Amino acid sequence: MREILDLTHRRKNLAQSTVPLPEKTRIFTVSNQKGGVGKTTTTVNVAAALAKSGARVLVIDLDPQGNASTALGVDHHAEVPSIYDVLIDDFPLADVVQKSPEFDTLYCAPSTIHLAGAEIELVSQVAREHRLRTALEQFVSEAETPFHYVFIDCPPSLGLLTINAFVAAKEVLIPIQAEYYALEGLSQLLNSIHMIQKHLNPPLRLSTILLTMYDGRTNLAHQVADDVRAHFPVEVLKTVIPRAVRISEAPSFGQTVISHDPSGVGSISYLEAAAEIANRHAESAETQHSTATPLEGATK
């Protein structure tokens, strides 16, 4: 009964809240080289939650497995123009983007099986680390209606595809599983982000960490959450994503959990996480603006 009341209260709060839209396109890379942490699930559900809240959102599926494309209900068989054609054959990104049936403001650049060989083919390409960034900048600047968010779903590795994602993005979102090995390997990922900042993309920053597969009944989950928050007090979202059957089964229906089970705990959690991501940025921008004003006045 307590859980039902809590969920009802959370639904009511979401219904009464508004999600601010950014003035400029926010570009996220969703990455973690550790598999099975809910990376693709987080990508598609946060994107769908923001689209449901009124934002125009693009998901770029950079994982050869194509799971994000499946979850968003877009075609990604071998004959479909895909992100592979953008990276290797210089296709305009606009030529491969498809609208997701989930929401009118949700779009996806799909992955196909061809992307599996892209790591090798990119080695000989000119400006191989910047190819996604160049295509994305052109797409965003030429879009008739501005996009508010772009989410790039990376493969579970630190190869050239992931490097392209880091170079194209401004922010990194890391999903971390609330289990024993949560922080293992994270230092390698942070070192990679630092190297990208230093040599290829200085504005890149780790802005968001989301705890996934959280089981509040176990002491381990609480301990992992405390450890992660101790290491990253600013970046970790207050919202956690619980273990939920509906979240896992939604892709088999070609849907995100936002559409598959709109009133369930998984959907509510991702809507809260998306709202927190949007509100954090709005608060940060407002703070920067308010601190800049007195300085401008003093100069005058």
Image (cartoon, rainbow, N blue to C red):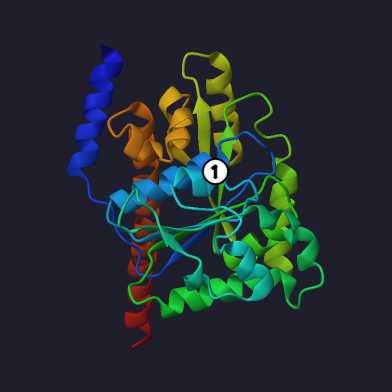
- The residue sitting at the bottom extreme is 300
Q: In the image, residue 56 lies at what x, y percent?
A: 35, 61
Q: Which quadrant is the N terminus positioned in? A: top left
Relative height, residue 74 to residue 91 (above, below): above
Q: Residue at x 59, y 63 (%)?
A: 83
Q: Of residues 129 and 281, which is closer to you in this image? A: 129
Query: Would residue 173 be seen by someone viewing this image from the given angle?
Result: yes
Residue 228: name its quadrant.
Answer: top right
- The residue sitting at the front extreme is 79
Q: Residue at x 34, y 41 (%)?
A: 271
Q: Of residues 120 and 224, which is closer to you in this image? A: 120
Q: Residue at x 45, y 52 (%)?
A: 74
Q: In the image, residue 180 lies at what x, y percent?
A: 66, 24
**Which residue is identified by label 1?**
40
Q: In the image, residue 135 lies at what x, y percent?
A: 57, 74
Judge the density around disc 1: few (<14), some (14-19), many (≥20) Cα neighbours within 10 Å.
Answer: many
- The residue sitting at the top extreme is 1
Q: Which quadrant is the C terminus positioned in? A: bottom left
- 220 sits to left or right of 106: right
- 287 sits to left or right of 1: right
Q: Of residues 185 and 284, which is closer to you in this image? A: 185
- 9 sits to left or right of 150: left
Q: Which kind of residue does numbered mark 1 sit on?
A: Thr
Q: Of residues 100 and 189, which is closer to you in this image? A: 100
Relative height, residue 171 to residue 39 (above, below): below
Q: In the image, residue 145 lies at what x, y percent?
A: 32, 73
Query: Would residue 235 be seen by someone viewing this image from the given angle?
Result: no
- 48 sits to left or right of 222: left
Relative height, residue 144 to residue 28 (above, below): below
Q: Secondary structure at mark 1?
A: helix
Q: Residue at x 39, y 36 (%)?
A: 257
